[in-house]
Image (cartoon, helix red, strand yellow):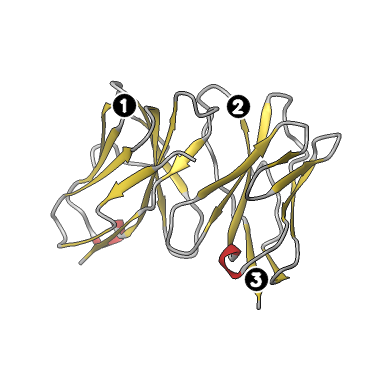
Amino acid sequence: DAKTTQPPSMDCAEGRAANLPCNHSTISGNEYVYWYRQIHSQGPQYIIHGLKNNETNEMASLIITEDRKSSTLILPHATLRDTAVYYCIVRAYFGNEKLTFGTGTRLTIIP
Amino acid sequence: GAVVSQHPSWVICKSGTSVKIECRSLDFQATTMFWYRQFPKQSLMLMATSNEGSKATYEQGVEKDKFLINHASLTLSTLTVTSAHPEDSSFYICSARGQGLSDTQYFGPGTRLTVL
């Protein structure tokens, strides 16, 4: 069963903020939202994760709605190197639950 | 972030031979390692999970006798594809989760296997 829903593709102009949405309406109280990205022919790269508060690091910001049923990953100033497939995954923080990848969003940064 | 390496980055082998792929956590101790497979234009599919010193747990449909996984130390896991066939050609990616990393999984760069 798919735990998250993401648009299959998005375009964003270089230098602009890229906002990638994710729906996770069945998220449980102990599940975090993780974001990874995969640049062509490479392994996935961890970006950020959060539970209910908004999070920010050097790569991106994560905005989680108050009801936790959706979230948005924000790349503040997109560059061509941000072109990748972005995966939104929900997973319990501890324990043996696995990261299960969906189809993600293919983000293309336009020069 | 934590660094995971894989070796080799690509390999070409003849049908019927065995291929070993190494996965190392370079700056942390990996209590759990994962092996994924990715076919062209598809998402990552988990093959198996292994804890250091224990037998791997395989996902449904993955042949444990064909994909041998060894996680003998906290920094090394190996995947051996035995008697490889062309349909085993794929992108194999390992991932590790370890102590002091807030339970986050980090991924290696992947190994491209081509079986002729």
The residue beneath circle 1 is B74
Residue lying furthest bottom in this view?
Answer: A111
CA separation, marks 2 and 1?
A: 21 Å
| Image location of residue B92, percent across then percent down | 35, 51
Find numbered disc 1 in the image and state the secondary structure of the residue it sits on.
Answer: loop
Q: Chain of mark 2?
A: A
Residue at the image position 56 percent from the left and 53 percent from the top = A37
Same subunit: marks 2 and 3: yes
Disc 2: CA contacts within 10 A as few (<14), some (14-19) or many (>=20): some
**x 28%, y 21%: residue:** B53
Name the subunit of mark 1. B
Front residue (pair B33, B27): B27
Find residue B90 and report its horizontal and vertical position in percent.
Answer: 34, 58
B54 relative position to B106: left or right: left
Disc with the residue nearer the chain's start (2 vs 3): 2
Q: Is residue A9 above or below residue B72?
A: below
Question: In the rendered image of this protein, does residue B89 appear above or below residue A62?
Answer: below
Residue A109, label in figure: 3
Q: Work out whether residue A40 can be spotted.
A: yes
Q: Position of residue A36 (x, y in %)?
A: 57, 48
In the picture of the structure, the residue carrying the numbered disc 2 is A93
